[in-house]
Image (tube, rainbow, N blue to C red):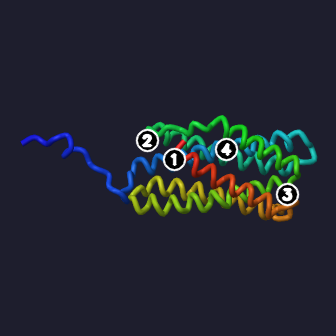
Amino acid sequence: MSETRFQRRQVKRPGMIDRAGRTGEMIRVDHAGEYGAVQIYKGQLAVFSRLPHKARIASQLRHMEADEQHHLRAFDRLLMERNVRPTALGPIWTLAGFGLGAATALMGEKAAHACTEAVESVIEGHYGDQVVELEAAGETELAETFDRFREEEVAHKDLAAEEGAKDAFAYPLLSGLIKTGCRIAIKVTEKV
């Protein structure tokens, strides 16, 4: 007896997770996040790299941007390998990231570090949650990659804290706004 079309199709019930779809969301969001991070550092470097007396922070930012570029290339590969579409919001993240980077750099070194500390605080938790979810789903290789990237983001956060991020003018407000923006970007990018 042949199966009917209805019998062959797996029906998704409430509470069931579409594993491939959920992993695709993670990859899309993380790709966009790494892209945005690169843009933030480009914005900060557009300011600091032109100032000879800011060579130290410019060097730090170049190093962190290189890490983000490495992460971005990995997510570029994952998008292709897993057939995941990138976010449609790329042009917005370009402007927002570069603008945030340039604005915080214009506010000074401490504000630039506050930006890094705020962004990386959100990303640390974000990656951490994803690692737990991926491990539970048996995606151990992907979980290991995400965890390695999380550790590098933590190193950026720690450097920013050591460099006086919390001494930035209006730090609680600046940090809170940046963290809120990151959380909103994550939610929107999961779907768009």
| Label 4, label 3: how far apart the Cα atoms are | 20 Å
Label whose residue precedes the other's in the sequence (4 or 1): 1
Q: Residue at x 46, y 46 (%)?
A: 24
| Label 2, label 3: how far apart the Cα atoms are | 39 Å
Please give the residue where the numbered disc 3 appears in the rendered image.
110
Residue found at the very far left of the displayed protein: 1
Q: Position of residue 122 (x, y in %)?
A: 65, 59
Instruction: Sort mark 4 into few (<14), some (14-19) or many (20+) by Cα contacts within 10 Å.
Output: many
Q: Which mark is residue 27?
A: 1
Please give the residue where the numbered disc 4 appears in the rendered image.
36
In the image, taking residue 39 as reference, residue 87 lies left or right, namely: left
Q: Mark 2: which amino acid?
A: Arg
Q: Which mark is residue 82?
A: 2
Helix, strand or loop for disc 2:
loop
| Label 4, label 2: how far apart the Cα atoms are | 21 Å
Quarter containing the C terminus: top right
Q: Position of residue 140 (x, y in %)?
A: 43, 57
In the image, taking residue 94 as reference, residue 84 lies left or right, namely: left
Q: Are marks 1 and 2 in contact (CB under 8 Å)?
A: yes
Q: Residue at x 53, y 62 (%)?
A: 129
Q: Mark 1: which amino acid?
A: Ile
Residue found at the very far right of the displayed protein: 53
Q: Are marks 1 and 3 in contact (CB under 8 Å)?
A: no
